Image (tube, grey):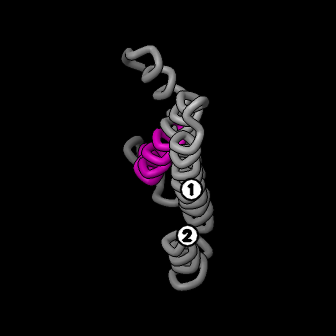
Amino acid sequence: AIGLIAGLVTAWHERFNPKLVGVFAGLSAVAVLQATSSIMGYVSIRKARADPENFDKHLRRHKWWMITLWTSCLGPAFFRVPQLFGAAAGSPLMFLGLIATVVWPWLAMRAHEKRSVL
């Protein structure tokens, strides 16, 4: 939570630039997803330990949240992909990175459950 708050203050106050509002919005969305994933992953594993009868259900949720955390940490890299194809550094195309950040956990979890490649 401290990292999330510090990051938001840095982006929206300390280093604010009106030309980069889209960048700050995308990074803020990813930061909130990271914090949510961390908290929910922790809660899920605690529930798994406390409720042995539903251990597998809670463990699956924990895996989901940890895959989502990993993917959200890749979000800033996904934002840069349009630049590889010539888009400017604050281009609205950066938001395509949010699509990958949202879709990738579903694909990764499916592959994990099938024990296969995506």
- Left or right: 1 in relation to 87: right
Label 2 neighbour load within 10 Å: few <14, some 14-19, many 20+: few
Give residue 105's position: percent from left, percent from top. Answer: 52, 34
Exactly how many numbered labels are in the figure?
A: 2
Q: Is residue 98 magenta?
A: no
Q: Secondary structure at mark 2?
A: loop
In the rendered structure, which amino acid carries the disc numbered 2?
Ala
Q: Position of residue 110 (x, y in %)?
A: 51, 21
Q: Considering only vertical position in the picture, is 55 above or below 33?
A: above
Q: Is residue 13 visible?
A: yes
Compared with 63, 31 (above or below) is below
The answer to which of 99 and 89 lies nearer the viewer is 99
Q: Are marks 1 and 2 in contact (CB under 8 Å)?
A: no
At x 46%, y 59%, the residue is 89
Real-space Cα distance between discs 1 and 2?
Answer: 9 Å
Q: Residue at x 47, y 55 (%)?
A: 88
For the point 58% across and 71% down, which residue is it?
A: 19
Q: Which residues are magenta?
A: 64-82
What's the amino acid at mark 1?
Answer: Ile
Q: Position of residue 102 (x, y in %)?
A: 58, 39
In depth, the one of 78 and 46 nearer the eye is: 46
- In the rendered view of the protein, which quadrant contains the N terminus? bottom right
Callout 1 secondary element: helix
Q: Which residue is mark 2?
A: 1
Identify the residue at horizontal 51%, vertical 43% (top origin): 49
Q: Is residue 100 above or below residue 14?
A: above
Residue 94 seen in render: no
The residue where tag 1 is placed is 39
Q: Nearer the viewer, residue 50 or 94?
A: 50
